[in-house]
Amino acid sequence: MAGLTKENPFDIARRQLDAAAGIIGLDAEVLELLRWPMREMHVTIPVKMDDGAVRAFHGFRVQYNDARGPNKGGIRFHPDETIDTVRALAAWMTWKTAVMDIPLGGAKGGVICNPKTMSPGELERLSRSYIRQVGRLLDLEKDVPAPDVYTTPQIMAWMADEYSFMQGHNDFGVITGKPLALGGSLGRGDATARGGIICIREAAKMLGINLRGKPAAINGFGNAGAFAHKLAVELLGMKVVAVSDSKGSIYNPDGFDHQALMEYKKQHGSVADFPGSTPLTDAGLLELDVTVLIPAALEDEISCRNARNIQAKIVAELANGPTTPEADKILHERGVYLIPDLLCNAGGVTVSYFEMVQNASGWYWEEEVVHRQLEKKMAAAIKAVHQAAVQYSVDNRTAAMIVAIRRVAEAMKLRGWV
Ligand code: GLU
């Protein structure tokens, strides 16, 4: 996990933007607009705790840019949340929906809290209270939230219910990542990981690497990381030799059985001390000699502190913003093939978009249709990013940024904003 000298993620997001804008000679007026969120809301949320005391929580919703369609992005519940993390994540959502060419803008929400220490009742009251505050910014045509770090389909259900009360009618479509019973989409649960696995498969093809039986390491065993484990084994035939969560990292050169690990984590609240495993440090996990490294936790996992020691051939960013710009440069120079977050973890928001389409039409797709459409979207985005990387001789992140900002800038110009 991140060290002491964590960089401000919004500064990083802006540096990435400036770099890509410089390469394509983006108009100064467009760039200036893209360097700022268009709207943001800061809220203080009173929550009655189980002991009867009322606690004030602080939260945010940032709507970064909706030139291409309604703002879209998840809500995080995390003790280290700050307005600048949420701004960065909202900017990245804007680029992500543009890279995927889905008609949406970018947003993000966050509440500073530690869900691990809260009861289900406290979490429900916090979720409802947050929506009572930011609900006035939300609407199918304005801003559509979804799950992110430490938020779940159940939390989305409470939020959709609260929002429906505010509107006076059922309005579940305003949130995605909902449980199936409330209009969620089949295939949304593992969509982030599935999109990443598709990217890894295509990258390996391009690099001439056979992934069967090869080792992979996953930093972060949350929703995306756990499904990545399952799908790396099922779809790619890889051996996942190391995984970690906030309580510890574990290693087994023979690979971990997904089902057994999930059951163990459910019982013990962490993967740490899983029978048959050796403990590792987080730094040790990132620097393992594996074919594929999947950072799936938080920002700033790969920085100038460790980029030179990364041994993986492919780094697949399932987390948002896990690599700093300095580390990007080092990895690129060292020939590590990086699949940037904007592409690698975009399966989640893409299936969220499919969920919006299904909610709007009232017609629900079979899982196989979701998978097929996701494959198509991922293939088109991978191709666009690859072409930009070749055309401008840049690394994949800069290429993804170029694809994205061109599309956002085109919409802004057509709308007459600049
Ligand atoms: N939180 C996910 C992301 O960072 C999904 C967002 C969404 O589905 O709107 O991409």
Image (cartoon, rainbow, N blue to C red):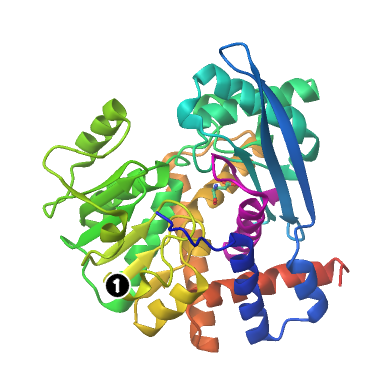
From the image, which quarter does the C terminus lie in?
Answer: bottom right
Q: Residue 344 at what x, y percent from top left?
A: 45, 61
Q: Find out whether residue 198 is within the magenta segment.
A: no
Q: Residue 411 at what x, y percent from top left?
A: 77, 67
For the point 50% across and 49% down, the residue is: 348
397 and 98: which is toward the camera: 397
Start-end of magenta stretch: 71-100
For the point 37% across and 48% down, the residue is: 220
Q: Find out whether residue 93 is within the magenta segment.
A: yes
Q: Residue 112 at what x, y percent from top left?
A: 60, 38
Q: Quadrant of residue 287?
A: bottom left
When the figure is inspected, residue 10 is found, relative to residue 25, above or below; the finding is above
Beta carbon at label 1 within 8 Å of ligand 1 = no
Whether residue 179 appears in this view of the structure is no
* Left or right: 115 in relation to 47: left
* Left or right: 248 in relation to 360: left
Q: Residue 43 at what x, y percent from top left?
A: 75, 37
**Total numbered badges shown on the rendered structure:** 1
Q: Quadrant of residue 136?
A: top right
When the figure is inspected, residue 272 is found, relative to residue 390, above or below; the finding is above
Q: Which residue is mark 1?
A: 309
For the point 57% across and 20% down, the residue is: 122
* Left or right: 66 in relation to 376: right
When the figure is inspected, residue 376 is found, relative to residue 123, above or below; the finding is below
Whether residue 140 appears in this view of the structure is yes
Secondary structure at numbered mark 1: helix
For the point 46% across and 46% down, the residue is: 369
Kindly identify the amino acid type of the residue bearing the numbered disc 1: Asn
From the image, which quarter does the N terminus lie in?
Answer: bottom left
- Give the farthest residue toward the front: 4
* Left or right: 221 in relation to 16: left
- Circle 1 packing at 10 Å, graded few (<14), some (14-19), many (20+), is some
